[in-house]
Structure formats: C-alpha cells, structure tokens
Image (cartoon, grey):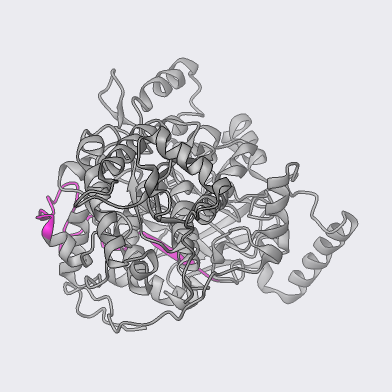
C-alpha cells in the first residue's frame, strides 16, 4: 500500500510567508514550519449536538500547542489552526425535505476533511465529532489519509425531565407526541425534552456509532460515554489525546493498522449487543470501504453470518433508549462502554488482540482502565442478558433481492407471532404522503397494515432521509390502540425509531426495485425464520412482469426518472441523484455509481471465530 503524502513546507519564500505568519499568530516557533504538521478538527452544525465541540477543540489545540517546541520532550512539529466541517441537524429537520441532506452530510464531511488532510498534508490529527453522520465521514477521511489520527466524541446530552410526572424525556419523546391533539401538551414536552447540549443521549445512531468507533479502535473507550458537559472532556482528555497521538506518531501507528477486518467485526457485534441503530449497516460498509475493503458484505461479514450472530450468538446487554429505559449518561455512570466490551470479551465474542489508538490491544485497554463488571440493571451480563437476541437482522426475499433490508429487532414491540408478520400493503409515494395521512386520518390505519414508503432512497429522494417523524407517530398510534402497524421503506430510520420498521429495501424504487411494483392491498410477509421480506403477488412471474412493464413505461415517458422521485434542485442533490450507490455499499456518492476505494487491500482472516461461552451449541463458523 502506497504511503499517504505528508506535505512539508519548503523554503520557497512565497510558500513560507503565510506559514511564518500563522506560526507567529498561533504563538509557535516559526523555525518549526518545515516540520510535519499536526492539528485539531471538529464537526459543527445547527443543533445542540455541536454546541460543545468548539470548546473541546480549543482545549485540545491548547494542549497540543503546549507540547510543540524544540525543547527536550517537546514535539518538533508544525501546528495548524483548527478546522471545522458543517452538517445539517437530524433532530430539527426530520420529517422535512431538508432531511435529504443528512446522509449526504456524511459525504460532505468526508470531502471537506479530505481537502484539509490532503492539501495541508497533516501528519497527525485529533478530531472532535458530534451528531450522527459527521463522525463517520470524519473516520472515513482519516482512514483514506492514513496518517496517525485519533477521534473523541463530543459527548451525549443529558435526558430531559417532565416536571409534572418526573418522566425522563429526549428528542424521541417529542416526536412521539407530534400527533397528540393538545397543542399545549406538545409544547410542554418540546420545552423539556432537550435541555443543555450534546448529541442524542439514547442508543440512537450517534451513540451506536461512537461505540462503534471506540470498539473499532479509533477512540479511547473511556471517552465515548461521558456527557458533553463532563469536565473531563476539557480538563483531562485533551492531554491524554495529545499523548496518544504523540505515541502513534512515534510508533508509526496509522488508522489502517487499527481498522482491520476483525476490528470492524468486533464493532458490528457490539452494535448488535447494544441494540444499536439500523444505520450501522449503512456506515459499516462505508468505514470498511475507506479502510480498503471494497464490499463489507463480502469481505468483512456475510449477511448469513450477520443474521446467525444476531439470532443465536449475540444478546442485547443494555436497557437503553429507545427500546429500553436508560441513556448513555447512565451507561457512563456504571462504568462506560468498556463494561460492555469487557462482558463480550470475556464471553468470547470479540477478538481482543486487535490494536487501538491508545497503543494497546483492545483487551489491554479494557484491563488498564480497571473496567467494572456489569451492574445488571443498566448493563446486563452475557450470561443473563437484557434480551437474548441481538438487535439487528438483514432480510432477503423478493422485495429485497440485494439482501439489504434491515430490521431493528430490539425495537420491535409486537406483531411477530412465531417470528412472522403478515400484513396488507398501504403504499405512499414518499414520506410526506404518509405524514399527511397520519395528520388528517390516523384512524384509517388498521391492525397489521404494512405501510410502504418508497421513492425516498439514495437516488429517489435523493439522499435517503430517515423517518423518525412518521415512525414515532405510528409507535404512539399503535400503543394507544393496541395494534401493530409495520413500515417498510427504501429510505432509512433514525436510531430513535422503534416498532416493526424495515429500512434500506433494495434495489430502491427509483432504480426499478420490486418495492416499486407493490400495490395497495398486496400481502406482505416478513419472515424472520427465513430472514425474508416477500410480497405474495410479486411471486407470480406474470404479475411481476406486467407491473414492471407498466413502471418502465411511466419512467420512459418521464425522461428516465420516475415522476414520484423527489426533485434534485441543488447541485448537491443532483450529485446524489447521479452517483449514490446502494445501501449495501454504504449509500455514498461515487462517480458513475462505482464504489471507489483508495489502495484496496485483502480482508485478511485472523482465524478468530466469535463464540458465546454461555451458548456452546451456537458454534457455527463461517
């Protein structure tokens, strides 16, 4: 694998002029401008998620600056000023057309950091990340640049509290009361759901991916769970991060040395064990790609192995929102995510020999931290788990021939009698149509309806928005009426979504996937015994051919794009329309829809096989 370039400032006076000026303004030695560069980066956007980032970036920058110099024990490096990326707010924009920019924001973060890391040629980077998609874009950029780097979570927000009832609240609570007829009550919950600052506090996508980044080795485990306003993030962690980075640079330890096949597999297993977000099956392929593995579902973990682990081997260990009771701050209070990792290591489910950014193996890091045993209330043991079955399942079948459909089993509240759901299709051509129906006629939704939202995939929307707004309303409707209404879509879900919801159905409708051919009243079967999602009518070749031909006629008459697709009315949305790859490949933006990998490498197998010592009968190897 060729080496990523580290740009050095030569002695050309034009190229030296500003670097000398920068050094003086930053208070560092101008004589160091010809040394390799180091710096801090952060992610920012319009939400509470990002409000603590700048202070942490400044604290780390100050700590890094204190170590820069020509003296004994100092780092002889050029310091660059902090840089930031930008992203939308999932929490504010859910249920709107602007939500199309959320997943695209992962790509924008990646591109912005790619420019900074490559053009500046950083030899060492510390990143502070917040919200859902920017952390993944940040990690992908660091993996492609492949010079010493380390990530720190900005931290989760504390839960809110209803002053009238004492009930703990979060942003999902607010979305779940959107259909309540009392405007004063809706406002009451909105006012108390999200006090303070920090990223979503439940085991939603943010904390799923922060845990993933920690387990994959690019973030110290003890820095994942503390809340954003925890004093350690300003007073203790900056010096630790600088020391870890210095050690990485001295040893030549780089991101691709850390993010290997087994570390990605470890992180996926932990995502199952925390009942994590379905978005992990979008982000794991992107992280694997950036690490040099072109196809996650072939190189890292097959769908068959994923489902076997989820069904028979990996239990859910956390009683966490949105399917449970507690938040990440509660996990921190009982010892942090390292407790979860310790439990899984001791059970035989994780490879503890993989390297991490602290310079230790995963097992060594857990041991050095003096990790506590599971408390049995917030974090359960593998021997006596919170739920016996892992949190996620991927589905094939005639509606998901790409084996892309994803179900968060940990969040299902009913409807899977004998692992089977049988329902009647109610089709909506885009999310807004469903929201209109939920607003105006919620009584029309009946027990065992399978709501289908299509033309909101990576190409169709474009941008693949998540659907926290409608899933939250459906959850509340089902709880109030004691019914089950399922939902499937070629778009995706928030980590805060619960219920029988199936996302990432592919190929997506915009590209002529079978979901485009479903009609109102069709029978839809979600079969978890066989991990399939099927439409009974589409099993008939004659019906399938007739509906496909009718669809193709509509597309041809509309210039090659189905009229139900969203309007790509900005350059960024147009880029997504023309270049988004399927969910199974990460739903990223790649020229000609061909996944691009910098310096591909073989997915070397270590020989480690995940086993659960408490379930010796589940010993199948793949």
**Which of 372 and 256 lies nearest the eye of the viewer?**
256
Boundaries of the magenta span: 368-396
Is the residue 402 above or below the residue 178 in the image?
Answer: below
Q: For residue 4: magenta?
A: no
Asked if the stretch drawn in magenta spans residue 377, the answer is: yes
The structure residue drawn at horizontal position 16% and vertical position 72%, both measured from the top left corner, is 614
Which residue is at the front of the view, 220 or 509? 220
Residue 479, image x, y percentages: 41, 39
Percent from the top left, x then y, of residue 231?
21, 33
| Location of residue 612 (image quadrant) | bottom left
Residue reaching furthest right? 557
Instruction: Report the side of 621 relative to 287 (left or right).
Output: left
User: Is residue 609 in sight in this rendering?
Assistant: yes
Tell which residue pokes out farthest to the top in this image: 184
**Does residue 310 appear in the picture of this structure?**
no
- Quarter of the picture holding the C terminus: bottom left
Residue at 32% of width from left, 67% of height from top? 252
Please tell me whether the stretch drawn in magenta is mainly helix, strand or loop: loop
Q: Position of residue 192 (x, y in %)?
A: 36, 22
187 to 212, vertically: above or below = above
Q: Residue at x 19, y 47 (%)?
A: 378
From the viewer's perspective, tell me whether residue 462 is left or right of residue 380.
Answer: right
């Amino acid at each position: 694998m060729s080496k990523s370039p580290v740009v050095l400032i030569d002695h050309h006076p034009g190229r030296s002029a500003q670097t000398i000026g920068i050094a003086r303004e930053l208070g560092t030695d101008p004589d160091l401008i010809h040394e390799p560069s180091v710096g801090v980066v952060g992610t920012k956007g319009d939400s509470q998620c990002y409000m603590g980032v700048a202070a942490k970036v400044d604290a780390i920058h100050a700590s890094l600056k204190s170590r820069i110099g020509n003296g004994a024990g100092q780092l002889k490096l050029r310091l660059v000023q902090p840089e930031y990326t930008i992203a939308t707010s999932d929490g504010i924009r859910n249920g709107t057309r602007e939500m199309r920019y959320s997943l695209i924001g992962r790509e924008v973060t990646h591109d912005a950091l790619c420019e900074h890391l490559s053009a500046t040629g950083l030899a060492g980077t510390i990143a502070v990340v917040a919200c859902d998609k920017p952390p993944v874009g940040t990690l992908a950029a660091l993996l492609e640049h492949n010079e010493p780097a380390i990530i720190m979570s900005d931290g989760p927000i504390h839960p809110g509290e209803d002053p009238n009832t004492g009930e703990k609240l979060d942003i999902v609570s607010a979305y779940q009361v959107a259909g309540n007829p009392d405007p004063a009550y809706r406002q009451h919950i909105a006012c108390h759901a999200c006090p303070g600052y920090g990223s979503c506090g439940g085991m939603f996508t943010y904390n799923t991916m922060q845990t993933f980044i920690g387990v994959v080795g690019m973030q110290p485990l003890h820095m994942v769970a503390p809340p954003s306003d925890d004093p350690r993030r300003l007073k203790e962690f900056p010096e630790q991060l600088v020391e870890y980075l210095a050690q990485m640079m001295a040893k030549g330890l780089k991101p691709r040395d850390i993010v290997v096949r087994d570390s990605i597999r470890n992180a996926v297993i932990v995502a199952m064990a925390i009942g994590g977000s379905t978005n992990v099956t979008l982000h794991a392929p992107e992280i694997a790609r950036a690490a040099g593995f072109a196809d996650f579902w072939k190189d890292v973990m097959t769908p068959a192995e994923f489902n076997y682990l989820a069904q028979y081997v990996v239990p859910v260990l956390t009683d966490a929102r949105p399917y449970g009771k507690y938040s990440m701050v509660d996990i921190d209070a009982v010892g942090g995510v390292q407790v979860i990792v310790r439990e899984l290591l001791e059970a035989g489910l994780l490879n503890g020999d993989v390297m991490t950014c602290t310079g230790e193996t995963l097992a060594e890091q857990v041991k050095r931290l003096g990790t506590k045993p599971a408390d049995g209330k917030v974090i359960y043991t593998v021997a006596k788990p919170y739920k016996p079955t892992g949190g996620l399942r991927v589905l094939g079948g005639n509606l998901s021939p790409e084996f892309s459909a994803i179900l968060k089993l940990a969040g299902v509240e009913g409807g899977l009698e004998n692992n089977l759901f049988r329902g009647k299709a109610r089709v909506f051509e885009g999310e807004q149509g469903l929201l209109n129906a939920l607003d105006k006629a919620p009584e029309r939704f009946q027990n065992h309806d399978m709501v289908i939202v299509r033309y909101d995939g990576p190409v169709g929307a474009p941008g693949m928005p998540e659907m926290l707004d409608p899933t939250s309303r459906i959850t509340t409707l089902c709880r109030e009426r004691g019914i089950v209404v399922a939902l499937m879509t070629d778009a995706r879900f928030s980590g805060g979504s619960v219920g029988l919801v199936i996302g990432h159905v592919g190929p997506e409708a915009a590209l002529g996937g079978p979901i485009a051919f479903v009609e109102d009243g069709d029978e839809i079967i979600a079969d978890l015994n066989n991990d399939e999602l099927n439409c009974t009518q589409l099993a008939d070749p004659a019906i399938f051919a007739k509906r496909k031909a009718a669809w193709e006629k509509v597309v041809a008459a509309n210039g090659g794009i189905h009229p139900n697709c969203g309007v790509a009315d900005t350059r960024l949305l147009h880029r997504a329309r023309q270049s988004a790859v399927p969910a199974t490949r990460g739903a990223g933006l790649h020229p000609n829809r061909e996944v691009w990998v910098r310096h591909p490498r073989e997915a070397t197998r270590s020989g480690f096989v995940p086993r659960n010592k408490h379930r010796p009968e589940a010993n199948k190897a793949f």
